[in-house]
Amino acid sequence: MNIKECKIEKLNQIVDFVYTKNILKNFRCRPFLIDETSENIKQFYKRYIESESSSILLQYDKDKLIGVCPIYWIKDDKYLSITAGIFAEENYSFISKNFLDYLKQKFNSYTLFVNIAKEHNEAISFYTENNFSKLEDAELYVLEDFSNSIFNKNVHEISIKNSDEIFNYLNKLMDENTYWNTKRLSKNLDKFFILAYFDNGIKGAIYAQIYKNNSVEIFGMLSENRKIQKILMQSLASQCKKINATKLILYSEDKNEILLAKEIGYKYLDSNICYMLKL
């Protein structure tokens, strides 16, 4: 078997390879949806080829393309992810194992993350058999209509005056394995909405990343009060309306959060299982 990094001249070939497999429910790879267009796939992979911190690995049997594995890494954090892959011609486990062995050599001591749809049974079997830890089993919902959203008077966006108080609150409730911890959030404030509900101190907070395509994704909502959670979600939607966001995404395995999202008007988008392995 032969594994190479994809060059731009191979882009059309891999798009054709991936498109024909992604339209099959049991082989779709997140974040692609089952009706993903070939043009969207092409633009997604083109960014991976052109970026200095990502690549697309191609696996060949002689001259035949049999596998596609896009990867993204953050060197300082020893972070590595497989995104929109692995796509395999046949024998998913064999092809995926070749990619995994390659990554173990090239990214030794990194932590590898991969997200897949619940329907991809071969991927689930592969990651389970190769000792990946399951971090999340979640669903994705999307809100695209912000017309009824209201910003609550008790909710405040992070500022110089309240940042210490908000970050102290988040530090107390964040899981220690949370990637977007307060240290990273504080260095990327221009990429996030961070809101807190104040009533004799902070009673809840929500933070969400703003992407370049003007979509927004909720990364954390910290409050045990259902009413405050709903207020925070509605206030965040109001902020999305201000920037003319295309959509607001909730990725969660919390059933109560999902019920709240449905009440506000979110629609089901996708499923996701996240696996992790220390290489």
Image: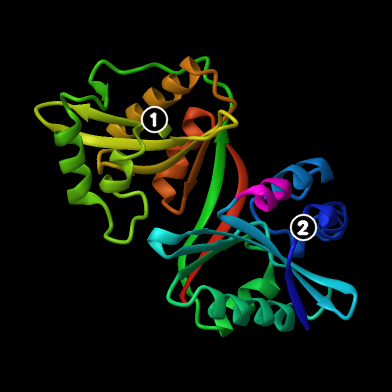
Q: Position of residue 233 (x, y in %)?
A: 39, 30
Q: Residues within 10 Å of mark 1 (few under 14, many from 20)?
A: few
- Vertical comparison of 52 with 60: above or below: above
Chief SS of the magenta region = helix
- Left or right side of 81 for 278: left
Q: State the image coordinates of residue 73 (x, y, percent, origin top left).
A: 51, 59
Residue 46 coordinates in the image, percent (x, y)? 73, 47
Which of pointers 2 and 1 indicates the residue nearer the eye?
A: 2
Q: Which residue is tagged 2?
A: 7
> Closest to the observer: 160 or 32?
160
Structure colour scheme: rainbow
Of the numbered discs 2 and 1, the one sitting upstream in the chain is: 2
Query: What residue is rendered at 17% in x and 42% in y?
Result: 169
**Secondary structure under the numbered disc 2 in the rendered image:** loop
Circle 2: is it few (<14), some (14-19), or many (20+) Cα within 10 Å? some
Give the answer, above or below, for where 126 lies relative to 53: below
Task: List the residue tagged with mark 1.
Answer: 190
Q: Residue at x 27, y 60 (%)?
A: 176
